[in-house]
Amino acid sequence: MLRIARATDPGGDYRHVPGDNFSELPTASFNVVLSAFTFDNIPGVTKGRIFRDLGARLAPDGKIVSIVSSPEIYLHEWASFSTRDFPENARAKSGDIVRIIVTDHVDRRPVEDIVCSDESYGAIYRESGLEVVQMLAPLAEGNEPYTWVSETRIAPWTIYVLRQST
């Protein structure tokens, strides 16, 4: 991924962060931190520590953009995901393991995630010294070149924009 990022944008600053150790990254220096689906399979206690460490790296007006799977993704059918084989997902509470199958590639083995509700994310952010600036639940419009299943009615993902608490 680093090779592709550098080839696409040679002027960008791309780094490999081993594990979840951010100690090599300077504090109070990043304007934007993007986390796309990073937290879908990380337990809540670890989520909080990582968000606290990421928040410490934000410049004074910096933001974290965190894209996560909404709890609804584990309950419905999607253009590229299936939950049909996992009715037990409907009983899952925040912190429980849920399963989903990614259907747009050859490997059809179930993926295990940890469901996290909006309320739980809110608590994790608060405990990490962060506040939600904006929360988005985007829907497909229906005019895209895909055969949507649930995406025009139910948001499969949630986007949180966060900043350090004031």
Image (cartoon, helix red, strand yellow):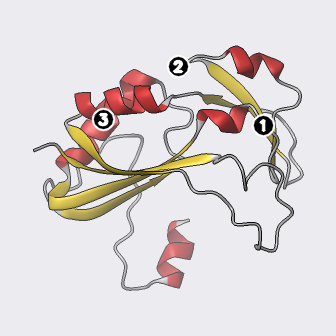
**Amino acid type, residue under disc 2 in the picture:** Gly
Q: What amino acid is at disc 3?
A: Tyr
Q: Closer to the camera, 80 or 122?
A: 122
Residue 23 seen in the figure: no
Up-down: is 3 above or below 97?
below
Q: Position of residue 73 (x, y in %)?
A: 68, 39
Pointer 1 residue: 76
Quadrant placement of the N terminus: bottom right
Decide: few, some or many residues near mark 1? Use Cα within 10 Å; few <14, some 14-19, many ≥20: many
Quadrant where the image shows the C terminus: top left
Quickly name the residue at label 3: 125
Q: Residue at x 89, y 52 (%)?
A: 106
Q: CA distance from mark 2 to mark 1?
A: 19 Å
Point out the frontmost of discs 2 and 1: 1
Q: Which mark is residue 95?
A: 2
Residue at 37% x, 78% y is 12
Distance Cα–Cα, label 2 vs label 3:
15 Å
Pinpoint residue 113: horizontal percent, then vertical percent: 63, 31
| Residue sitting nearer the eye, 149 or 127 | 149
Which numbered circle lies on residue 44? Answer: none
Is 3 left or right of 160, judged from the image as shown?
right
Q: Within the image, what quadrant is residue 62 found in?
A: bottom left
Q: Secondary structure at mark 3?
A: helix
Q: Is residue 97 left or right of residue 18?
A: right
Name which of mark 2 and mark 3 comes first in the sequence: 2
> At 65% from the left edge and 46% from the top edge, which residue is drawn?
156
Q: Amino acid at mark 1?
A: His
Question: Could you say whether the residue bearing mark 2 is in a helix, strand or loop?
Answer: loop
Left or right of 62? Residue 16 is right
